[in-house]
Amino acid sequence: MADGNQKVEIRNAVSAEEWQARVDLAALYRLTAMYGWDDMIFTHISHRVPGPEHHFLINPYGYFFEEITASSLVKVDLDGNIVQETDSMINPAGFTIHSAIHAAREDAKCVMHVHTDQGVAVSAQKEGLLPLSQTAMTVREDVAYHDYEGIALDLDERDRLVADLGPKKHSMILRNHGTLTCGETAAMTFTRMFFLERACTMQVMALSAGRDGVIECGESLQDKVAGQGGLTKESSGMAMLSQKLVWPALLRKLDREYPGYDA
């Protein structure tokens, strides 16, 4: 864990914009732990550092998500080089996935990837995310798919990952692996993941009745719900919901249950 001197040194050594990105990202890690989406020390969330350098922040490998603070985050460049003084290392698989999306998508300021039981279960189902719930229909139009290629250590996978995500989608099911979301802000990225993970959980529970035992909504209804939800594209509605309503409530909950992320 970062000590008090390191906290002071890092905060004084970076811009106000970078410090805010650090606080937002540390909050995301704590929220992931709070919602039970963490996978011990594995999986990763990243945030681009404001500025022209294309640096981004990622977790120090070996920390539980509930331990991460703004000061403990590691700053790296798109080649995986650590560009700040630190005793920590990063997860190579985290670098492969996150550097690909940050490099290709200017709007992907934040990228979140998790391995929940329910998300992995749906990622292993041939049909992917089904229109079985209102939650699924709200996000389904925005979900891309990427086939499994093994643990993400091969840098040449990045081109295929980016191609599968495309220029406009913000959520992805990584086949046999997990889920991923991205967004302009930490708030939008988390909100997308919340609904994607909820949709996966509902699907796993519904399919306990068997594939023939569930009601699948038709295409016209799917289109209607997707338009009503406002979660499938960058929009003023999406920004308002996540930034103005969801995020402040989440931070209040963190301050009550997981304080200290902003140190």
Image (cartoon, rainbow, N blue to C red):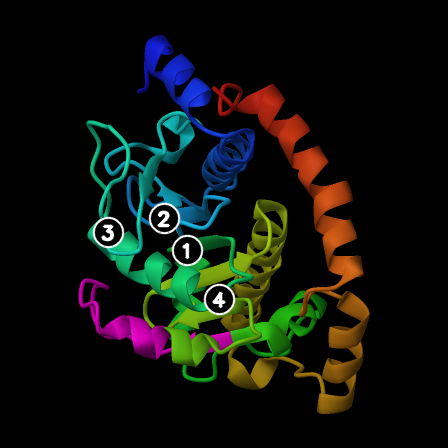
- The magenta region covers 144-161
Q: Disc 3 marks which amino acid?
A: Gly
Q: Pointer 1 and pointer 2: residues touching (CB < 8 Å)?
A: yes
- Whether residue 224 appears in this view of the structure is yes
Task: Report how far apart the C-alphas of labels 3 and 1 lie in the structure.
Answer: 18 Å
Q: Which residue lies under the disc numbered 1?
A: 113
Which amino acid, mark 2?
A: His
Badge 4 or badge 2: first in the primary sequence: 2
**Residue 131 at x, y = what percent?**
63, 78
* Residue position marked by numbered label 4 in the rendering: 105
Residue denoted by label 3: 80
Q: Alpha-carbon neighbours of circle 2 within 10 Å: few (<14), some, or many (≥20)?
A: many
**Percent x, y for residue 85?**
24, 28
Q: Is residue 153 magenta?
A: yes
Q: Which residue is denoted by mark 2 in the rendering?
A: 44
Return the residue nearer the eye: 12 or 215.
12
